[in-house]
Image (spheres, rainbow, N blue to C red):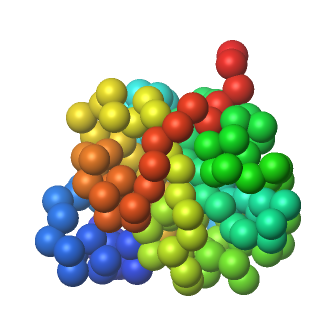
């Protein structure tokens, strides 16, 4: 099955960055991150989800964390140097990012927001994240992703 190029893939191609496209079965709705990892037979610690928050300053800030974990909002606020952050409403995802829930990629949003990726990403040769639509994941070297989107790494997750 030929996969249609997404904005994220076009940006990676334009920068001549190496990546792999992985696809998984889905309906019309978002698929839980752990289910994506299972379908792809990948380590859930290497499969990341993209979460969009809004700070008390009204700035949108993006956090990318392993799918098996939850965002720790206080740690996220501290990493971003703001007083607080909260998740945006699901209904606002498309308006803010240009993506849909379950298909939100850290690459190619309508605007490049400040982005933080969980520090564990650098401990893996490759990580996976949404390719920009439900059913598509991009697999690439974390260092290249961090450079491309000007992201910082930080401890962003709640302890298990």
Q: Position of residue 119 (x, y in %)?
A: 46, 34
Task: Tell which of 9 and 23 is nearer to you.
Answer: 9
Q: Quadrant of residue 95?
A: bottom right
Q: Quadrant of the C terminus?
A: top right
Q: Is residue 87 visible?
A: no
**Residue in the image at 65% along x and 71% along y:** 100
Task: Tell which of 4 and 117 is nearer to you.
Answer: 117
Q: Position of residue 10 (x, y in %)?
A: 30, 79
Left or right position of 53 against 109 = right
Q: Position of residue 108 (x, y in %)?
A: 45, 75
Q: Position of residue 137 (x, y in %)?
A: 41, 56
Please determine whether, in this image, residue 131 is positioned above or below residue 122: below
Left or right position of 107 against 61 = left
**Residue in the image at 57% along x and 70% along y:** 113
Please determine whether, in this image, residue 37 is positioned above or below residue 9: above
Residue farthest along the top direction in this orientation: 160
Q: Quadrant of the N terminus?
A: bottom left
Q: Is residue 141 visible?
A: yes
**Residue in the image at 73% along x and 59% along y:** 53
Please determine whether, in this image, residue 129 is positioned above or below residue 120: below
**Residue in the image at 48% along x and 69% along y:** 132
Q: Quadrant of residue 156?
A: top right
How many numbered circles does the render carry? 0
Please determine whether, in this image, residue 43 is positioned above or below residue 52: above
Left or right position of 67 against 108 = right
């Amino acid at each position: 099955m030929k996969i249609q190029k997404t904005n994220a893939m076009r940006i990676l191609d334009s920068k001549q960055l190496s990546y792999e496209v992985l696809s998984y079965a889905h309906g019309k709705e978002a698929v839980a991150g752990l289910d994506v990892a299972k379908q792809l037979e990948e380590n859930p610690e290497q499969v990341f989800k993209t979460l969009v928050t809004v700070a008390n300053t009204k700035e949108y800030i993006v956090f990318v964390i392993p799918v098996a974990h939850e965002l720790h909002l206080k740690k996220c606020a501290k990493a971003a140097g703001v007083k607080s952050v909260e998740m945006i409403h699901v209904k606002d995802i498309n308006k803010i990012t240009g993506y849909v829930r379950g298909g939100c990629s850290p690459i190619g949003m309508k605007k490049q927001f400040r982005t933080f990726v969980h520090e564990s990403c650098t401990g893996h040769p490759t990580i996976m994240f949404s390719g920009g639509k439900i059913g598509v994941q991009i697999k690439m070297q974390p260092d290249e992703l961090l450079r491309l989107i000007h992201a910082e790494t930080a401890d962003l997750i709640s302890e298990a």
